[in-house]
Image (cartoon, rainbow, N blue to C red):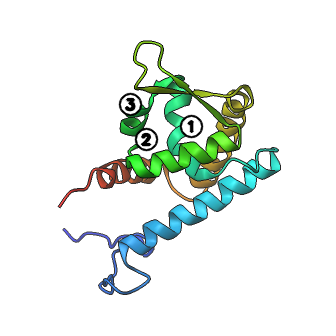
């Protein structure tokens, strides 16, 4: 029995070479860049232009559980200490979060959402629903599930 060829847009090209625009890393980076451009545009239109898509690495874990210790936040955000510290500083300056000493351990700090940032959660959830609709218009639910699973695997890629 002969197999039907895959749809052209899903077929892997033999030209997927390291130094081309067909390279997986390049495509992932450009897809992420476009996603972030769309997100930030929607944030601006909603009155949250001071929130950058990169802040999501800190905000998502805090939306799940506010008041996390810095160490736990670093673990959940999957950012290096150096990157997280710089991002936390910027977010504090923009009054998106508040850093407080942990009452049970003076050496540790906890990070809390500011009231305006708590309100942003509902806004961003609506924006993400709209983004999901854009994806649904281009991918079948099966392809979206495959893409999600593949991205989760790539997030844990090791040598």
Query: Nearer the N terminus, badge 3 or badge 2?
Result: 3
Q: Residues within 10 Å of mark 2 (few under 14, many from 20)?
A: some
Residues under labels 1 and 2: Cα distance? 9 Å
Query: Nearer the N terminus, badge 1 or badge 2?
Result: 1
Q: In the current view of this chain or complex, which residue is farthest to the front?
A: 106
Query: Nearer the N terminus, badge 1 or badge 3?
Result: 1
Q: Marks 3 and 2: which is nearer the front?
A: 3
Q: Position of residue 128 (x, y in %)?
A: 63, 43
Q: Secondary structure at mark 1?
A: helix
Q: Position of residue 101 (x, y in %)?
A: 51, 23
Q: Marks 1 and 3: which is nearer the front?
A: 3
Circles 3 and 2, Cβ within 8 Å, touching? The answer is no
- So how many labels did they put on this image? 3
Q: Residues within 10 Å of mark 1 (few under 14, many from 20)?
A: many
Residue 146 higher or lower than 75, as above or below: below
Q: Quadrant of the C terminus?
A: bottom left
Near-viewer residue (29 or 138) = 29
Q: Position of residue 37 (x, y in %)?
A: 65, 61
Residue at the spot x=64%, y=39% of the render? 92
Residue at the spot x=29%, y=84% of the render? 14
Label 1 sits on residue: 59
Q: Secondary structure at mark 3?
A: helix
Near-viewer residue (70 or 36) = 70
Label 3 sits on residue: 72
Label 2 sits on residue: 77
Asked whether, in this view, residue 132 is left or right of residue 48, the answer is: left
Q: Quadrant of the N terminus?
A: bottom left
Near-viewer residue (23 or 58) = 58
């Amino acid at each position: 029995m002969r197999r039907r060829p895959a749809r052209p847009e899903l077929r892997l090209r033999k030209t997927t070479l390291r130094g081309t625009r067909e390279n997986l890393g390049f495509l992932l980076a450009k897809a992420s860049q476009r996603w972030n451009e769309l997100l930030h545009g929607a944030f601006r239109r909603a009155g949250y232009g001071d929130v950058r898509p990169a802040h999501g690495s800190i905000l998502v874990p805090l939306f799940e559980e506010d008041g996390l210790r810095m160490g736990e936040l670093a673990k959940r955000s999957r950012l290096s200490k150096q990157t997280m510290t710089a991002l936390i500083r910027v977010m504090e300056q923009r009054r998106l979060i508040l850093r407080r000493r942990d009452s049970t351990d003076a050496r540790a700090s906890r990070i809390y959402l500011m009231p305006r940032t708590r309100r942003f959660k509902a806004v961003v959830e609506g924006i993400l629903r709209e983004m999901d609709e854009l994806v649904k218009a281009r991918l079948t639910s099966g392809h979206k599930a495959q893409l999600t699973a593949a991205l989760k695997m790539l997030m844990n890629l090791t040598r």
